[in-house]
Image (cartoon, rainbow, N blue to C red):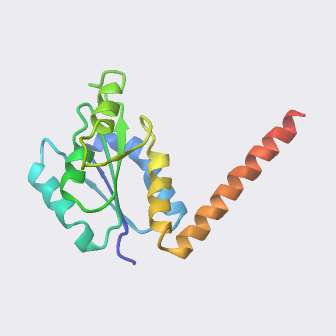
Amino acid sequence: MKSALAGVIMGSDSDLSVMQEAIDMLKKFDIPYEVDIVSAHRTPEKMMDYAKNAHARGLKVIIAGAGGAAHLPGMVASVSPLPVIGVPVKSRNSIDGWDSVLSILQMPGGVPVATVALNGAKNAGILAAQIIGSSDPTVLEKILLYKDQMKKQVAEKAKRLK
């Protein structure tokens, strides 16, 4: 099996139902990935080790999902040289998800986190594939096919309306 190119991490196993959509998109594009629970608040040492060493293990991008205060994506981005995609997760202790969205979105200058919509793990998986596809022609071709399929689906739906 190929070494992982994308890391999918989340603060809790309760986030997996949302983060599964990112995993599904990575599978669709045949991108090797790894999945782990890495809590910024409950396992900060593990989080720092993961973030600092991900690039040395061959990862090209990290997708980090978290709910509530949602510090995981930003803290990972603060020490990793890799692009980090944050997925705000609406958790049971969340304030309609806005706390998670703003925690990930409002990063200080110098510590970028690409942020997708609340529970938008599917788009995180696609964005990770596009990042990898920018230097991998095989993945790029799969992305082009995916976008063409979406275009055809819209055309078919429009045709049915007439």
Q: Is residue 159 left or right of residue 73?
A: right
| Farthest-out residue, top | 95
Q: Position of residue 152 (x, y in %)?
A: 76, 52
Residue 115, by quadrant, is top left
| Farthest-out residue, right | 162
The quarter in which the N terminus is drawn is: bottom left
The quarter in which the C terminus is drawn is: top right
Going 44% across and 49% down the picture, which residue do you hit? Answer: 124
In this rendering, the answer to whether 82 lies above or below 100 is: below
Residue 5, by quadrant, is bottom left
Q: Position of residue 47 (x, y in %)?
A: 16, 53
> Is residue 147 something one can see in this rendering?
yes
Q: Position of residue 46 (x, y in %)?
A: 13, 56
Going 49% across and 47% down the picture, which residue do you hit? Answer: 122
Q: Nearer the viewer, residue 14 or 151?
A: 151
Going 19% across and 67% down the picture, which residue do you hit? Answer: 53
Q: Nearer the viewer, residue 40 or 84?
A: 84
Going 68% across and 51% down the picture, which residue do you hit? Answer: 150
